[in-house]
Amino acid sequence: MDIFGDLSGIRLTQREELNSLSLIRTEHPELINEVLLEGICSLTSKWNKEIALHINRSGRISGIAIGQHASVKLPPVRSRESNRLRCIHTHPGGNYRLSSVDLSALESLSLESMTSIGVLNGEITGAELALLTDAGTINTIEFSPKELKNLNYAELLTQSSIRSAVITRSLPEEERAFLVSVEKEELAEELLAELAELARTAGVKVAGQIFQSKRFGSTSSYLGKGKLEELNQHLQNTHANVLICDDELTPAQLRNLEESTGIKVLDRTGLILDIFAQRAKSKEGKLQVELAQLQYLLPRLSGQGQALSRLGGGVGTRGPGESKLEMDKRRVRQRIHFLEQQLQEIRKHRMTQRLQRIRSGLPLIALVGYTNAGKTTFLQKAMEQTRAKGENLSGENKLFATLDPTVRSLNIRPDRQILMSDTVGFIQKLPHQLLNAFLATLEEVKNADLLLHILDASHHQALEHADTVHAILKELNCADKSTITILNKIDKVKQSTDLNRLAQQLAHPIPLSLLQEKSLSPVWNMIEELLP
Ligand code: GDP
Ligand code: MG
């Protein structure tokens, strides 16, 4: 029998072992013959690959495929026989839950049923079976290893009572992320909280989180072996279908994690790119996001380059170049070149605009600050109070509501007009390639005559946030620019000593609450004082 899929690294003798297994017939009313089941589980562990079988109504195997990672590379199906085929496949790594890709395959191929079997060290950890109901919904039912072996499949197909008793899961499945960080213990909690916020900003639910101390992390699979097993247990319990790691993963770590968990894996950079992708509005912003995505993707494409196609949509695959995320390496390089040229054109144009601005003689003030500190709120208030014309900006309680550079002109005094630009928020561990990709949004910072640093003074890590901002300013060679620090959100500050401490450590502090305070004139006064 033909075996489809990725046979690389599989010896001929083992291929023959699979071939002889494929002759075993499953008896009515079993789901799968027990010897056959044990055979594919043992091969799954040996190869660390998925094995997918199609079994027809007479109990014969009609197709075999071997898959890498979390992909379901199913054997080809003739459409008129599909609804009499059950697909049974293994998940190396032990997670027996059906993935969203499995469920969409069940639906799009209209198979009779789809079963995933978790396999760890040759042993079955459990199984999940899904059936398509007449109403078009999907019913899933979980089995322990013992239940799986004693399953009366024929009865399951006919018994409507069982069908209605099982859990109903409908497509499209929401994305539930499990977060992992490998960090020093004292940092992990804060970084995970920020990662959770990022995940929510991307529109993903957070199902749980764990961290591993940096000492025990692994260079090949990110997490150590014991932690991986703990993680797989959590993934099963929480039904998470996306794993988000706090660090930038190497291509090998990404692959290994996907193999051992059987679900989609994203790292911090991939997540941030996804958020940028959803939020870029201007032409420049979109080009930059696509460029950053492709640069990130390139080293992660395998030789043949199927890459993200297996992810089956959702977080990590969205963006201006969405359809292009399935290109091969050569075409990715071409596209990167094209994007770089386009961006250069746009930057030239911006340069002309900037020259015009310099000629207009107006001072430029750049808002900087940690994400969610209140930069957009500030600009909004400033525009209200100075009655300058301009479109309405909306501040959202999400990270990165501001992606594209926005410059507004404000009359802070009858005889004083300034330009103010909003910037993208800074965060800890902002990936380097992103910093480069978004340098353009920060170009306004480089060109500014004065910086207005907005800080969420009510945040328990306010000082650390300020440090992050200062570190990034230093990278932009802007550390020496005059800076006013707005200690914002004082309505939420509980200890006045905390506020005093911040005021002592930061340049030109002005405590205020953008939500409660009426007037921004202390800020305008300070600007007057500091402007050359
Ligand atoms: P940005 O990411 O720095 O642009 O932050 P935004 O301007 O989008 O503000 C983030 C969130 O903080 C929004 O939900 C604002 O309503 C809220 N916010 C801004 N200023 C204050 C304030 O003085 N007090 C409180 N409690 N919330 C504020
Ligand atoms: Mg903003």
Image: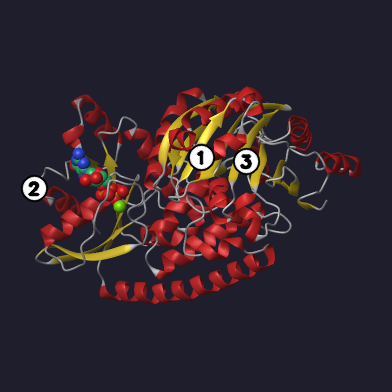
Q: What residue do we see at 19% from left, 53% from top?
A: 529
Label 2 crowd (10 A; few <14 / some 14-19 / many >=20) = few
Among the two numbered marks 2 and 1 on one chain, the one whose residue lies closer to the N terminus: 1
| Numbered label attached to residue 241 | 1
Label 1 crowd (10 A; few <14 / some 14-19 / many >=20) = many
Q: What residue do we see at 41% from left, 31% from top?
A: 190
Q: Is residue 343 above or below residue 499?
A: below
Q: Using residue 492 as the reference point, say whether residue 169 is left or right of it.
A: right
Q: Using residue 93 as the reference point, say whether residue 198 is left or right of it.
A: left
Q: CA distance from mark 3 to mark 2?
A: 52 Å
Q: What residue do we see at 61% from left, 39% from top?
A: 115
Name the residue beneath numbered marker 2: 518
Image x and y of residue 111, in percent? 59, 50
Amino acid on which the number 3 mark rests in the picture: Glu
Single out the mark in the foreground, 2 or 1.
1
Name the residue beneath numbered marker 3: 258
* Disc 1, SS: loop
Amino acid on which the number 1 mark rests in the picture: Asn
Amino acid on which the number 2 mark rests in the picture: Lys
On-image quarter of the C terminus: bottom left
